[in-house]
Image: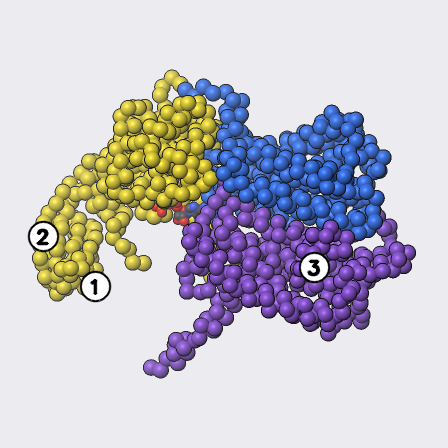
Chain colours: A purple, B blue, C yellow
Amino acid sequence: MTSLPKLHRFNSTSLEHEWRTFRIAAWLGWQVESNWTVPIVFFIYAILRPISTALILLLMYIVIAGNHRGEYFDYLYISNALYLIVMQSIANMSWTVLEDREHYRMLKYIYTAPVSLFAYLIGRAVARLSIGISTSVLLLTVGALWMGLHLSLLSVQWGWLVTYFALGIPVLLSFGIVIAGLALVITRNGEFMGEIIASMLLLVCSVYFPPDILPVILRKLSLAMPVTYWLEGMRRALAGGLLRYSAAMGGRPISPRLALYSNSDLAMILACFSVVGVTISFFFYRWIEGVAKARGMIDRITGF
Amino acid sequence: MRSISPVRLFFKTVHARAVPRMIGMKREPSWIFLEILVPLVNTTAFVYLYRALHAPEAYVGFVILGSVLSAYWMNVVWAMAMQLHWEKKEGMLQLYVLSPSSLMAILVGMSYGGIVMASWRAALTLIVGLLLFNVHFATDQLPLVFLVFGVTLIALYGLGMTLSSLFIRWGREPWHLALAFHEPAFFLTGMNFPLSALFASVPGVISLISALLPISFGLDALRQLLLPGTIVGVFPPMTELWLIAGLAVLFLTTSYISLKFMERQARVEGTLALRLS
Amino acid sequence: MSQSPLAIKTDNVGRIYKKKAAKRVSRASSPDSSRQLVALDGVTLEVEKGELFGLLGPNGAGKTTLIKVLTTLLTPSFGSAEVLGYDVVREPKAIRERINMVSGGETSGYGILTVKENLWMFSQFYGVPTKEAHRRSDELLARLELTGMKDTRVSGLSTGERQRMNFCRGFITDPEVLFLDEPTLGLDVHIARVTREFTREWMRKNPERTVLLTTHYMAEADELCDRIAIIDKGRVLACDTPENLKRMLQAQPVFQIRAGGLSESGIDGIRSTTGVIGLTQEFDLETSHHSLNLILQEESVISDVVGAIGAAGGKLVGLEKHEPTLEDVFVKLVGRSLKEDVTE
Ligand SMILES: Nc1ncnc2c1ncn2[C@@H]1O[C@H](COP(=O)(O)OP(=O)(O)OP(=O)(O)O)[C@@H](O)[C@H]1O
Ligand SMILES: [Mg+2]
């Protein structure tokens, strides 16, 4: 009558417990995202929107610059593809909370179950993150094959790519947690929060254009955003170096401001942001969860 | 017995269903924040993209007008889809079907509230465009501008109601599809670039789909009327007006037929009150 | 209309649901018939105008399905149904103008609106003049003891308060036929009584109005309804006034027995005694006595029952014969009680 498995369960540390929550949440996240339809439709769904955005940008580029793709197009295209990862991990986190609260009426059960909501949210975020990464890769492939994007596996600086990517993920996730926390205390229009944040980031993270052309205040804001540096680093790594305007337009870097930073400068900056971001998000989240509880927002349902 | 005429009942219902939206706007003013911020920021991003590309200043005007109409587009497809999904889940839809009012009246009431919301958004986008980006619009054809705008809206909401009938019958799928067609529709309607550029670079089938979306020609006509000389239209504005009017008739008819059909179908299949599909 | 039609008339009406197969979970063994569910299996009913008619049945009996068919939310798979002389399939609009429905446990209304605004909104869909709507809602809210809440947003109401508002919504359009599907679900005893009294009073004041009510509470059905149909598995098992239903058991005596020391198998033994038509049990934790309710073929069977109790090792504590209740009728027809927790 030795019940070893049971004993093992009793001894499980809280870290193990969090890990289990996290795994379940990542799985649940995937289910919620995908199981409304057959895989092929889900695939089309996941790729249709990003491809369309890419097409919009392509046409905007063509109506001005004609059919020759300069490095600005690479700037635009690569940023847009990477921005998908940003969107999925940051903007859509508010969706997770709202969907669980209002559509599935689940949040209160998760909340009252002996699992940590924090681990749960991270788990859901990771599910979204992986969707973002795969669509992003797909988009880059499509761009290189059919849209005239200059991208070759030989010129990619793989070492830097891995470095920037690894340093960026904690930043993105902690951002996502902060947003999810905010969504907890928002009632109506919460579903648009993702939209608001997505558009803000689009503007200040130098996705479509370099920070240099923004008015002073926005430029400063842009240079305070970790995502700006992450995108710059990833762009350089993918394109194999600093991106410049064509020789006809002077051949200067697309962003002279960001060109001031060397690759290792960018990595240092991102490392600092990671540490700060993770710390802040953790404490912010604990605080806002308290607020949500105090206001009875965990099982709130709105709508009109 | 009941002595109210169907027409009066229709308008009473439209009014009654519009009221919750109005009250909602008043009681939860957070939407104003949203309505100011999102269009401002979105439009600005595209404006700066054109500037970074050293585009002629007229393109700023194109983007502003595109954003104005996109406010309504978003409202029709996204907000209506969300709302109906919610109503069905909450069992409200079944109460609507139960009442002697037509579903069409309910939807019109809902859209009316939505139009007011979207108009705020559109007006703010315009103000931003005029004040922050110094766009100059030609004002010599204003009556025609309003006519084109009005007809475009009718066609658009006709399309919206046709789509709604899908939400009444099915659950989560059309809702996801509405989301999935967000950016594709922006592409197909030329929200950020001249429609002629689209027609010149995509296969005929895609041009045809684009032509079926009321925003496409509506926007093209408005750009030609308000920013004359800066854009090559697909057709002259008057021709485009007739095309949109045709779409308006088409979509109002399809919405009427498909709402009736879908309601009947949902009754047969027992999906009117399906919870958490 | 020349001769006044019946309020509700169904003729062998039925409804079959097609069940969607669960995704991914592949059940190779499931036969094809399990894909279909006969929720309503040929129901024939006639309800006169002015009647308060009850539908009584266990979960899944088909009560809600029948109401959905009658309220034109669901088309019947076979048979026909009429409300106020109008066919549910062909003339839904004429029916919708004249009916309303309240079902328990459903959110009805927008969280952002107040109770009063919600009621007004619903009344407008029926073309009630605004003034009249306000007058009626004030009156209804007062009766349901919600006056203090009339300017509260629905999002801030408790479940029971929401249900009371829902109840008012049904009456505000002054329907000719009102369908109440478990209207007292989630209401406390006092408010539940208020709603019953109100329903009765409303019918007294408007003798032409008809109510079709479903409930799980025997007492509610007994107290309220003029006639009751007991349905199970989509079929009507009996349909009559509560008195007549009870009279069905007149020839079959009902006994209440209290006994100690009985096991489950012992009770099963008593149940299978010849002459026992129905048996329900309750267990008293304090005294650890079983309380058995028995419907017997004839009085003489009781001696066999007492014998069976002794044989099962039980000790008889009390025995009395009582007048049949609706509950007994239900047990006899359906084979189990609504009170009893059925372990399946
Ligand atoms: N939309 C549906 N699709 C498939 N089956 C359904 C659907 N609605 C009801 N059923 C099934 O039909 C049967 C009858 O359901 P119905 O809701 O009419 O029961 P009821 O008598 O109202 O029960 P309760 O007392 O629990 O309210 C049930 O077995 C139920 O599972
Ligand atoms: Mg029921």
Q: Write down the residue under mark 2.
A: C319
Q: Amino acid at mark 3?
A: Leu
Q: SS at mark 1? A: helix
Q: Write down the residue under mark 1.
A: C265
Q: SS at mark 3? A: helix
Callout 3: chain: A
Closer to us: mark 2 or mark 1? Answer: 2
Q: Amino acid at mark 2?
A: Leu
- Measured from the top left, where is residue A302 in percent x and y? 48, 45
Check disc 2: other Cα within 10 Å, few if <14, some if 14-19, many if 20+. some
Task: Confirm whether residue B266 shows in the render.
Answer: no
> Which quadrant would residue C245 be assigned to in this image?
top left
Labels 3 and 2 positioned on one and the same chain: no
Query: What label sits on residue A223 in the rendered view?
Result: 3
Callout 2: chain: C
Residue reaching furthest to the front? A216
- Measured from the top left, where is residue A100 in percent x and y? 50, 54
Query: What label sits on residue A249 in the rendered view?
Result: none
Q: Eyeballing the image, is B11 above or below A161?
A: above
Task: Confirm whether residue B53 shows in the render.
Answer: yes
Q: SS at mark 2? A: strand
Check disc 3: other Cα within 10 Å, few if <14, some if 14-19, many if 20+. some
User: In the rendered structure, which disc, 2 or 1, sits on the residue that comes first in sequence?
Assistant: 1
State the CA–CA distance, disc 3 to disc 2.
88 Å
Quarter of the image that includes the N terminus of chain B: top left
Q: Residue at x 15, y 47 (%)?
A: C254
Labels 1 and 3 positioned on one and the same chain: no
> Which quadrant would residue A71 be assigned to in this image?
bottom right
Q: Amino acid at mark 1?
A: Ser
Q: Residue at x 81, y 62 (%)?
A: A243
Left or right of B245: which side holds B162? left
